[in-house]
Amino acid sequence: MMPKPKALTAAQSMESKGPSEPEQLVESDERVDLDEDSDPEETMEEEVEYEEVEVEEEGEEEIEEEEEEEDLDVENANGADVFETKVEDGDEKRKHAELLARPPHGSEVYIGGIPHDVSQEDLKGFCESVGVVTEVRIMKGKDSTENKGFAFVTFRSVELASNAIDELNNADFKGRKIKCSMSQSKNRLFIGNIPRSWKEEHLRKALSEVGPGVTGLELVKDMKNLSNNRGFAFVEYYNNACAEYSRQKMMSQEFRLGDNAPNVSWADPKNADSSAASQR
């Protein structure tokens, strides 16, 4: 007979707690919210939003894959033995890819004897009888609307440039016989004041952080002390655009090879020996 009074006491103690009723109301409100959350229209909206997020994420992955494929396409299209460039900045990577996408060295020809009033469109159309033309530069005076009578035309490949010389030299263009020969565009740099203890791999690493397109590197050795170099090197690039880009970067006052500020210039065949002699 003892359990019955205890049950009554428990019931009485529960009734004496006033805040129990608001708690039941809150629970009731929560049930209403749950019922509202189960509204089929809102559920569909949430599913749609979730699907849209997934689509956006898939789109970002596709863009990244396309960028990687473009980088591979550039490498495969050029077909040149270009040393790997080590850059992490996205804008810098795109700039490097753009430079490497341009035609290689040897794709530009010189055309002389053109009429002084000819347009770029006229000259491009004339040269496209040979193949794809990527750039036409008609040389003009600073204060003149007329050209100087010659231009530089860049073809898509070295082979097309060679064919242009064969086909267009002494050809008739708007009543004039023109001259067509290989352009003397530059793609080779002279770099002086290199740390004499550096090996080729040290210089190659430094160049890979500057710009793209290095195809050849000659770090001149000191024949009296084969463990050292003579303080200068010659660097060949895939095209003039890559060489000029790296030249400008290395001519910056902040740029250093180790602790040395390098001397950078075009390594023309005529002055290459004199540039090297100045470093002895």
Image: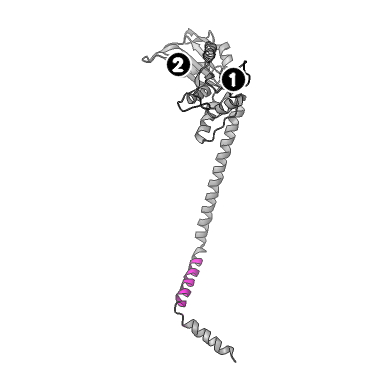
Reading the image, the residue beneath label 2 is 138
Instruction: Give the residues in magenta.
Output: 16-34
Most distant residue in the left direction: 143
Residue 27: in magenta span = yes
The answer to which of 114 and 219 lies nearer the viewer is 219
The answer to which of 86 and 31 lies nearer the viewer is 86
Q: Which quadrant of the figure has residue 163?
A: top right
Between marks 1 and 2 in the image, the one whose residue lies nearer the viewer: 1
User: The disc labelled 2 sits on which kind of residue?
Assistant: Ile
Indicate the quadrant containing the N terminus: top left, top right, bottom left or bottom right: bottom right
Dominant secondary structure of the residues highlighted in magenta in the image:
helix
Q: Is residue 61 visible?
A: yes
The answer to which of 166 and 96 lies nearer the viewer is 96
Q: Name the element at disc 1.
A: strand
Q: Is residue 34 above or below residue 21?
A: above
N-terminal label among 1 and 2: 2
Within 10 Å of disc 1 (Cα), the crowding (few <14, some 14-19, many 20+) is many
Name the disc covering residue 246, or none: none
Percent position of residue 204, x then y: 58, 26
Reading the image, the residue beneath label 1 is 229
Q: CA distance from mark 1 to mark 2?
A: 43 Å
User: The disc labelled 1 sits on which kind of residue?
Assistant: Asn
Residue 206: in magenta span = no
**Residue depicted at 56% across the width and 32% down the height:** 86
Percent position of residue 58, x then y: 56, 45
Percent position of residue 275, x then y: 52, 14
